[in-house]
Amino acid sequence: MLQLDAIEAGYAGLRVLHGLSLEVGMGEIVALVGANGAGKSTTLRAASGLLAPTAGRVLFDGRDLRGVQVHAVVRRGLVHVPEGRALFGPLTVAENLAMGAYHTGERADGVLELFPRLAERLGQRADTMSGGEQQMLAIARALMTRPRLLMLDEPSVGLAPLMVSAVFAALASIRDSGVAILLVEQNATQALALADRAYVIESGVITLSGTDLADDDRVRRAYLGR
Ligand code: ATP
């Protein structure tokens, strides 16, 4: 479904990705784990078109996304929830969800069933919600665009353990409903437990991939602390 093929990308004077390749298939959760600064967020930016790769290709459904505007990428079914969540802070929960549904007219029933806490707080301003609630809202708003692939940047960051479990449980339900997920996480233990497959990124390249990375000694030592 999504294919990154030998991507090079970075920022003024700093190349971060050095020929990075990865794939996400239909209906799977793929985790991308790696240390601070390895290039995880940059990978998602390159995939969603927020950052134009300087070399390599991004294919979605086999079509090259080069030059496709971010909103058009979303309409094709690929949505990116950035770190920091990018909610409309002064707007309410309901208004944020409505923004997500702008092009699809999607009804909120499904996401409110997935995140009942949002249903209790439809009139609350987004910027007064807790960190975990804001994360739920960001995921819910992304789902209102009816994606086929959801890319999430560090959904667990700054959340209390119970909230992390709630968010990860929701991700499993989303996958079971047929939406594929590319999950960037520093919380490698939980990400690898949830994912169907995973990649390790180091200094802008993929150094390991597979279905059982949590059992790999190198991964255990470097990312799982055991
Ligand atoms: P973290 O887990 O700390 O978020 P990451 O793996 O997501 O790390 P990136 O955010 O992709 O890493 O950053 C990779 C490198 O690119 C870092 O050295 C970072 O300082 C740099 N970088 C990221 N965003 C920018 C930017 N907007 N301008 C300049 N440099 C950037």
Image (spheres, rainbow, N blue to C red):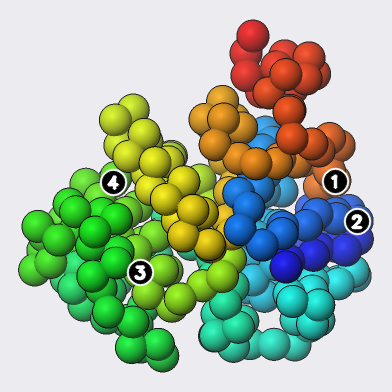
Instruction: Answer with mark 1 or mark 2, whichever residue precedes in sequence.
Output: 2
Instruction: Answer with mark 3 or mark 1, whichever residue precedes in sequence.
Output: 3
Few, some or many residues within 10 Å of mark 3 (<14, 14–19, 20+): many
Q: Mark 4 points at which residue?
A: 131
Q: Do the residues labelled 1 and 2 touch (CB within 8 Å)?
A: yes
Report the disc number at residue 61: none
Q: Distance between the residues labelled 2 and 4?
A: 34 Å
User: Residue drawn at (90%, 69%), measured in percent from left and top?
Assistant: 56
Q: Distance between the residues labelled 1 and 2?
A: 6 Å
Q: Name the residue under label 1.
A: 205
Q: Name the residue under label 2.
A: 19
Q: Do the residues labelled 1 and 4 touch (CB within 8 Å)?
A: no
Q: Are marks 4 and 3 in contact (CB under 8 Å)?
A: no
Whether label 4 lies within 8 Å of ligand 1 gets the answer no
Residue 200 as seen in the image, left or right of residue 79: right
Q: Inspect the image, locate mark 4, and give the three-letter code of the amino acid beneath it.
A: Gly
